[in-house]
Each structure stands twice: as C-alpha cells, then as structure tokens.
Image (cartoon, grey):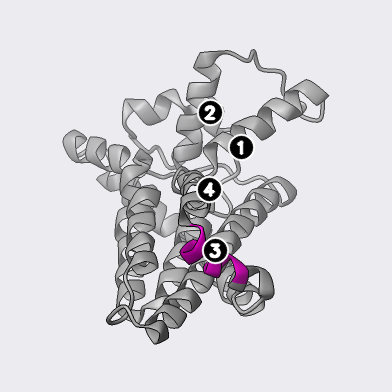
Amino acid sequence: MDETISRVMALLLGRAPGFDAIMLTVSASNLLKGAALIAAASCLWIAPAGGATPGNRIGLAADRAILASAMLASCVGEVIALALAKLMPFRLRPYLQEDLAMHVPQGLRDLAPRMMEQSSFPSDHAVLFFAMATGLWLVNRRAGWLAYAYVATVIALPRLYLGLHFASDILVGGMIGVTVVLVGVRLMADSAPMRWLAAQTFERPVLVNPVLMLITFQIATMLSDMRDFADLAGHLTGLDDDRPQITALNTAASGTAHSL
C-alpha cells in the first residue's frame, strides 16, 4: 500500500509546479496547522454552552479540564513519536528514495540533507494534530469531526502528496495521537490538579491565561523551540553524535525541517 500510494504521488508531482508550491507552503505553515486548531480549541475554551449561569460555569470548567488534559496528552504523544523515530529502524522519507523519483519543489530538495537525518516513521504531525482533534471531539462532537477532516485534508494529505511520509506513517501516527489523548483525558481530566487549573482560569485569569498562551504557542509550532533547545543541549553535552556548527542559519533550517 505504501509503495503504491507513493508511486501515484510521484506521477502527479511536477505536473503542476504552481500546485506543488502551494502544497509545500501549506505543509510548512504553522498558521494553517497548529494555529488553526488552537483557535478552534480557544473557542471551546471561552464559549459556555448557554448563558452565564453557575451551572454552565461548572460545565465550562469541566470542558476546560478536558481541553487542558488533551493538550498535555498531545505533547506527550509528540514526545512518544520522536522517541519512536529514534528507537525504531530508520525509514527514509519517500521523496528521498531514488527509486520513486519524486520531482518535489526546490524548497524541499534544499532541506534534503537535514531531512535525511529524520526518520519518516511515525509522522509526528499526525500524532500531534490528530491528538488535538481528539481533544476537540471530546468536548464537542461536531467540532471534533470537522477538526479530523481538517487534519486529514490540510495537514496529512500535503505530506503524503509531497513524499514527506508514507501512508502508514500517517495512519500509525494518527492512531497514536488518538489513543494517547483518550487515555490521557481519562486519567487526568477529573484529577485534582486539572480541576484546580480549571478553577484558576476563572479566579486568576490574568496569571493563568498568559501561561496557557505560551504553552499553546509551543503546541501550535510543534514544540519547535523546545526541540531546538533539546538539540542545543545534546550538542553541548556531547549526547548528540552530530556536531553541526551552531549558527542562526542552522537554527532556521532546523525550525523549517521541524515544521515540515
């Protein structure tokens, strides 16, 4: 299945350079990926189910506990995906495999050296964003189904089309993301720390909301800053075998590769 789908994509790539460029831009856009889902989560975070009554405040607090648990579980899922990519046998991305001969846009070819260091399996994009969609689904079924459709078409499909991932990379990644959030919310949403956090969003919003904004920003950008800090720590401590020159250009390239 993987090889068949990738060969079909290879036949399509290069026939419409303008469309290929659009797909590359969409696949790298944090605005169209994480920020769009965070905006949807913010709507559910802010809007109560009905009028501003004590009963609805209780319900809204419960929804906030679910969303906070889902966002935390999404980060855990991302860490699991990165760990699996390191621990499991290395899998070269489809567009880098010579036998597939994918004619990808120049911007993707420029990132080939960096992308050759990153295993294709599983897709950390699929893990993170299907996990976020699951959090929305747990609070609002309609919003959740729309989020699933959005992730499949706007986030997963371009990555499949451009040869950034095989179909199984995305399928397994999505399964990991959904499972991690379902388990995480079940374990955390009704816990004392989450109930306390939900209460603080009403009692001390000036203190709590800016912190949550920073956390959701990191999620929207796929933990790119945290990953760069982790890379830097690895280089400085010698835990990372690579010894690339640490420059602003390297950091920019790293961030671009993370977003793809």
- Residue 41 at what x, y percent from top left? 38, 63
Q: Amino acid at mark 1?
A: Arg
Quarter of image, res 23: top left
Q: Which mark is nearer the camera, 4 or 2?
A: 4
Marks 4 and 3, how far apart at CA: 12 Å
Q: Is residue 191 visible?
A: yes
- Residue in front for this viewpoint, 103 or 195: 195
Q: Quadrant of the C terminus?
A: top left
Query: Residue, x 70% and y 45% (percent of image)?
Result: 86
User: Mark 3, residues whose alpha carbon is within 10 Å: few (<14), some, or many (≥20)?
Assistant: some
Of marks 2 and 1, which one's residue comes earlier in the chain? 1
Q: Which mark is nearer the camera, 4 or 3?
A: 3
Mark 4 = which residue?
Answer: 211
Q: Amino acid at mark 3?
A: Gln
Mark 1: secondary structure: helix
Query: Residue, x 57% and y 13% (percent of image)?
Result: 247
Of marks 4 and 3, which one's residue comes earlier in the chain? 3
Per the picture, the main secondary structure of the magenta-coloured stretch is: helix
- Residue 27 at what x, y percent from top left? 35, 43
Mark 1 = which residue?
Answer: 227
**Residue 198 magenta-highlighted:** yes
Above or below, 237 against 115 in this view is: above
> What stretch of residues is rendered in magenta?
196-204
Mark 2: secondary structure: helix
Mark 2 = which residue?
Answer: 254
Question: Marks 2 and 3: CB-CB under 8 Å?
Answer: no
